[in-house]
Image (spheres, rainbow, N blue to C red):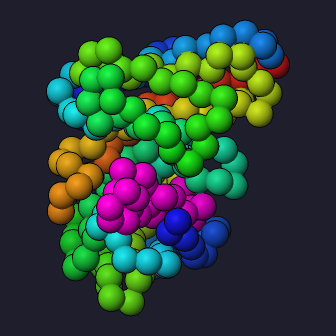
Amino acid sequence: DAGITQSPRHKVTETGTPVTLRCHQTENHRYMYWYRQDPGHGLRLIHYSYGVKDTDKGEVSDGYSVSRSKTEDFLLTLESATSSQTSVYFCAISVGDPRSSYNEQFFGPGTRLTVL
Amino acid sequence: GIQVEQSPPDLILQEGANSTLRCNFSDSVNNLQWFHQNPWGQLINLFYIPSGTKQNGRLSATTVATERYSLLYISSSQTTDSGVYFCAVAGSGAGSYQLTFGKGTKLSVIP
């Protein structure tokens, strides 16, 4: 499982409240990612990180922010949750380097978020 | 960005049958992975296969990069093979960070 944990695993919140999801990895991987999974869409990239304090936007970044103050933790924040952000959120890490010939991603167990 | 199409979208098999799942992609890729999402939602890595052929037990995969497709073969299927199979690809350059997923093939293996 590449040593990836996510917390919480389930959360129900109300529209307009802030929410932070945590991804923790134990193997010192440089690259980390947040994806969301919705029915009919597969998984889509929200944000990614290529090092401490180095992050960039993915395909569906609106309404989300991220932070990475230490190698092992990558936080995803919904500043003011909306019902359209109800989804399953997956964290991932890269073994290898996306810029090289080998870049395999491994995924955490997921967080199911419901925004009422 | 790269487009990924998977077929068939749904597949029902009798236990013991064989199947082939297909993934077509629209541009050259540096990364191609196959995943199995089990009924509990966990994403399990099956193959990292941007080109060539690999085998792991009853599963094998082939990617023909020049023709932009990959195939996943499941032989002697078991009920535990049920779930959704995803193909995901990443391109080169700025696109190398992002895995683009297909919509998946939902496999149901019945006893």
Q: Quadrant of residue A40?
A: bottom right
Looking at the image, residue A106 lies above or below residue B82: above
Q: Quadrant of residue B69?
A: bottom left
Could you tell me which quadrant the C terminus of chain B lies in?
bottom right
Looking at the image, residue B32 lies above or below residue A13: below
Q: Nearer the viewer, residue A55 or A28?
A: A55
- Which residue is located at x 48 percent, y 24 percent? A66
- Which residue is located at x 39 percent, y 73 percent? B72
Q: Position of residue A116 (x, y in %)?
A: 82, 19
Q: Position of residue A100 (x, y in %)?
A: 18, 58
Q: Quadrant of residue B73?
A: bottom left
Looking at the image, residue A97 lies above or below residue B33: above
Question: In the image, is B17 to the left or to the right of B90?
Answer: right
- Which residue is located at x 65 percent, y 54 percent? A41
Count of number-bearing discs: 0
Q: Position of residue A19 (x, y in %)?
A: 62, 13
Question: In the image, is B14 to the left or to the right of B44?
Answer: right
Looking at the image, residue B55 lies above or below residue B38: below
Which residues lie in the magenta part? B84-111
